[in-house]
Image: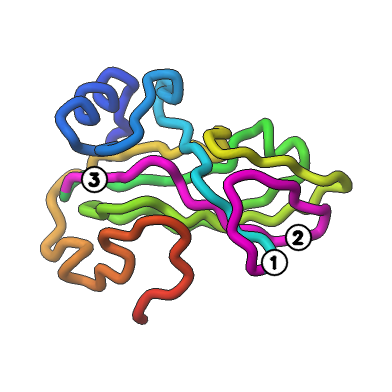
Amino acid sequence: MATLSDREIISLSSKGQLIAEEFRNESVTPNGYDLRAAVMRYDGNEMESGSIPAGKHFLVATLEYLMLPEDVMGQIWVRSSYARRGVIGSFGAVDAGYHGTLTLSFFNSGNEELQINRGDRIAQIVFHRMESIPEKSYSQRSGNYQGSRGITIKGSN
């Protein structure tokens, strides 16, 4: 498995792959891409910006719509600027062949309120090219969240 470089991320995204919508050059890193907040949900309320009190869980939908090729998967990390303030994220791998926005789960374990606005870079995705194409694609295995937009809480198991 090899990690895609900034050059490959830009090239594939310009062809409608990896990041098909809301791509921004300023979010490209040497070995990844900073995902931006579109909308968040806290205490059952959806908002484009707001404050998250200390000790609270919240969800964030990404602005970016991903179109991962069948041989590229993603790993997500909390941006270090948030981690230093006590934000913890719980993320799974983004399966090869996934199409959609992402719903990211965070917890503000810090001692201070956290302000998040639409467009804030909140997490980084690192793309990895797999050694071979899977026998069955994401949509064939489960596809629970294929085509998701906005905050998606439930998929079929």
Question: Residue 25 versus residue 117: which sits nearer the camera?
Answer: 117
Q: CA–CA distance between discs 2 and 3?
A: 31 Å
Position in image of residue 73 (x %, y %): 30, 47
Please state if 69 lies on the left or on the right of 144 as rendered. Answer: left
Magenta residues? 44-69
Q: CA–CA distance between discs 3 and 1?
A: 30 Å
* The N terminus, quarter of image: top left
Residue found 14% across the figure and 48% down from its top: 132
In the rendered view, tell whether residue 45 sits above or below residue 70. Answer: below
Position in image of residue 69 (x %, y %): 18, 45
* Residue 79 included in the magenta stretch of the image: no
Position in image of residue 131 (x %, y %): 18, 44
Q: Which residue is mark 2?
A: 56
Q: Which residue is mark 3?
A: 67
- Amino acid type, mark 3: Met
Q: Main secondary structure of the magenta part?
A: strand
Q: Which residue is mark 1?
A: 43
Q: Looking at the image, is mark 3 or mark 1 nearer the viewer? A: 1
Position in image of residue 22 (x %, y %): 35, 34
Q: Are marks 1 and 2 in contact (CB under 8 Å)?
A: yes
Question: Residue 25 versus residue 134: which sits nearer the camera?
Answer: 25
Q: Residue placed farthest to the right in the image?
A: 111
Q: CA–CA distance between discs 1 and 2?
A: 9 Å
Secondary structure beneath label 1: loop
* The C terminus, quarter of image: bottom left
Residue found 25% across the figure and 68% down from its top: 143
